[in-house]
Image: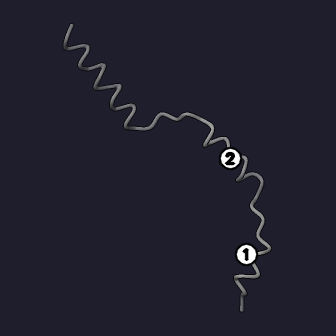
Amino acid sequence: MINYDEELKKFEPCLDVDDAEEAIYDRELTDVIDLLKEMLRDANNGKAS
C-alpha cells in the first residue's frame, strides 16, 4: 500500500513547471473581459462620431 505522507516528503516539483509558472505569473495577460471592454469602448466611440 502507498504511504502518502512518505511520498509527499520525497516530492520535488519539476523545474520546468516552476519555470513555466514564473513566466505565466510575470506576464500581464489580456483576458476576455479586457477584450470585451475594449470592443465596447471602440463601438461606443464609433457611434459618437
Q: Quadrant of residue 31?
A: top left
Please state if 44 lies on the left or on the right of 17 as rendered: left
The residue tagged with tag 2: helix, strand or loop?
A: helix
Q: Position of residue 21 (x, y in %)?
A: 65, 48
Q: Residue sitting at 75 percent across and 78 percent down?
A: 7
Residue pictured at 72% horizontal, 87% vertical:
2
- Point out residue 16 in the picture as x, y percentages from the top left corner: 75, 51
Q: Give the quarter of the figure containing the C terminus.
A: top left
Between marks 2 and 1 in the image, the one whose residue lies nearer the viewer: 1
Task: Check the image and report above or below for 19 versus 14.
Answer: above
Dot 1, crowdedness within 10 Å: few (<14), some or many (≥20)? few
Q: Mark 1 highlights which residue?
A: 8
Q: CA distance from mark 2 to mark 1?
A: 22 Å
Q: Quadrant of the N terminus?
A: bottom right
Q: Residue sitting at 76 percent across and 70 percent down?
A: 11
Q: Position of residue 28 (x, y in %)?
A: 55, 33
On the picture, is 30 further left or further right than 38?
right
> Crowdedness of circle 2 by 10 Å Cα count: few (<14), some, many (20+)?
few
Q: Residue furthest top?
A: 49
Q: Amino acid at mark 1?
A: Leu
- The amino acid type found where label 2 is placed reads Ala
Nearest to N terminus: mark 2 or mark 1: 1
Out of 11 and 39, give the one closest to the viewer.
11
- Name the disc covering residue 19, or none: none
Pointer 2 residue: 20
Question: Element at badge 1?
Answer: helix
Q: Quadrant location of residue 40?
A: top left
- Image coords of residue 47 (percent x, y): 19, 14
**Left or right of residue 39, residue 17 in this image:** right
Q: Is residue 42 above or below residue 12?
A: above
